[in-house]
Amino acid sequence: MIFMTPADRALAESISKLNYCNPFLPERIEFEREALGERFVFSKPAWSRQANVPADGPNVPKLILQTEALCHTLLERLQHGARPAGDGEVELYEDSVYFLLFHKYQPQIHEAYRKMNRRGDKRPFVCYRGLERDAHRFLIEHWVRQPRFNTPHLFAGFYQIHRAFQYIFNAIIGDSQPIIRLRASIWQSIFTHDMRRFWRVLYNRMGEFPCLILGPSGSGKELVAQAIARSRYIPFDTQTLTFQDSVDHCFFPLNLAALSPTLIESELFGHRKGAFTGAIQNRTGWLEVCPLLGSVFLDEIGEIDGAIQVKLLRVLQVRSFQRLGDTQDIIFKGKIIAATNRDLAEETRNGRFREDLYYRLCSDLIDTPSLREQLNEPTGGGEDQTLYHLVLHIANQLIRDEAEAVALSKQTVDWISENLGPDYPWPGNVRELEQCVRNYTIRRHYTPLARSAPARREALSHDIETGALTADELLGVYCALTYARTGSYQETARRLQIDHRTVKSRIDDDLLARYFPQLSPEE
């Protein structure tokens, strides 16, 4: 008796691809199309978090039903003596069963996780027993070999996938191309680009890979760090029906820019009594407190001085450290996640950041896009949609009333469009947008902070590098900038070695206001 028909195999191959693909990349859509054929419905190019919009697209329920029918058909053939033709069909059948079981038990996993978080205690995941029975029926009772993954590992994997998707989907808002790329990058940081290898050998070793998050202030670097930290693999205990650790006690953030070097060392490494003035008792640092499945988040790592860089390098190299004033080595068990808004390559060239530390940190790099980049590279709904969904998410958090949040969001976006315009650069990024929404909520007005010279130069540099300015606009900005500094058409013409009438005709006040709004002659 044949085990898989050509149609069965084609469907199983598509389901297998869906199992191991990055769900935040457009490839997922193509695999859905491949599996469903004419029944496929296109909704959006990737899973994008938009406030008040559900996560599941129209194709997921159809895929579940189709996979369920396939698994039951293949199980019935197994029961009647059919056997897979080679390892290829063995793995395709297993992957189909994994897909079915994940979607069957995902709602129960979510509910158990929600109750555990709400009550703040460690509660048993009794749904494991049902998964265990189903896994035995599909993968062991009539099967031809030991499944690739035992049931506790399978359940822990389902739990990790569910958490990772929820943390990424719910924390990273918007549907612009940069945000789609960011979600996909976070998923890859958690599971690597090859999920098959991850589930085989890397699931319990990701703590050995530091992660470095780069991006401007206010662009959500800590949200990215939290998503990675709270989505790590946690083994499941079949005796207690609980996971061996809690995601609520696995994230240890430290803002390095807010502390003096001595306090940074004390917070990170701990100290013995008498190690320095004011050390009146022993202190345990974050690196020692952090458990095996935990993550220490070092925000603004570009701010630390050379001595601490050397100590941190040792942690990354040999995973050990010493408390201040002590000589005993302590093993660091967790994962290091670092972030900075500085250009570490430039800092390294200038000798302010150790090159060897940078290369230890950059085994996994993530770039968070600025709000300006998000609004300049929309997907589908256009710039206003991207801005609207961000504002709506902020409004929902502020007032927690759906109808009022929608109304406030529309009013705020209209005000932004009328008063700040589509070219406003948002130097404070999402953090500034949040304050804009708060200001509008209270006063129906927002006054941007006068942009500093470095921020102005950054905006102009970005537009030059990305080719956002025409040659005429670039000349107009240069003429306007020089005129604003000299206050004289003649002097500007002399400096630029062009006719003063050309200077006068080229000056673009709108561009000057965009990049240098507070600049006056001889600033």
Image: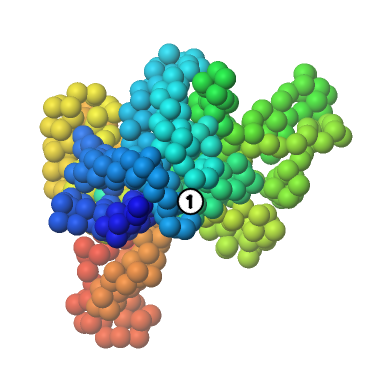
Q: Where is residue 220 in the image (x, y as percent from the top left)?
A: 41, 43
Q: Quadrant of the C terminus?
A: bottom left
How many callouts does the rendering have? 1
Identity of the residue drawn at 76% across and 40% down: 320
Q: Position of residue 301 (x, y in %)?
A: 59, 46
Secondary structure state at the residue bearing disc 1:
helix
Q: In this view, does 56 lie to the left or right of 302?
A: left
Examine the image and state in which quarter residue 321 appears.
Answer: top right
Q: Is residue 516 left or right of residue 122?
A: left
Q: Which of 419 and 108 is in front in this view?
A: 108
Q: Nearer the viewer, residue 111 or 53?
A: 111
- How packed mark 1 is, by other alpha carbons closer than 10 Å (few <14, some 14-19, many 20 or more), is some
Q: Is residue 282 left or right of residue 523?
A: right
Q: Would you place residue 84 above or below residue 326 in this image?
A: below
Residue 405 visible to an observer of this rendering: yes
Q: Nearer the viewer, residue 96 or 382?
A: 96
Colour scheme of the rendered structure: rainbow
Identity of the residue drawn at 82% across and 28% down: 275
Q: Position of residue 181 (x, y in %)?
A: 37, 55
Q: Position of residue 109 (x, y in %)?
A: 39, 27
Identity of the residue drawn at 30% across and 57% down: 5
Q: Which of 360 and 96 is in front in this view?
A: 96
Residue 29 visible to an observer of this rendering: no
Identity of the residue drawn at 36% across and 25% down: 108
Examine the image and state in which quarter residue 431 appears.
Answer: top left
Which residue bears the numbered disc 1? 195
Residue type, numbered disc 1: Met
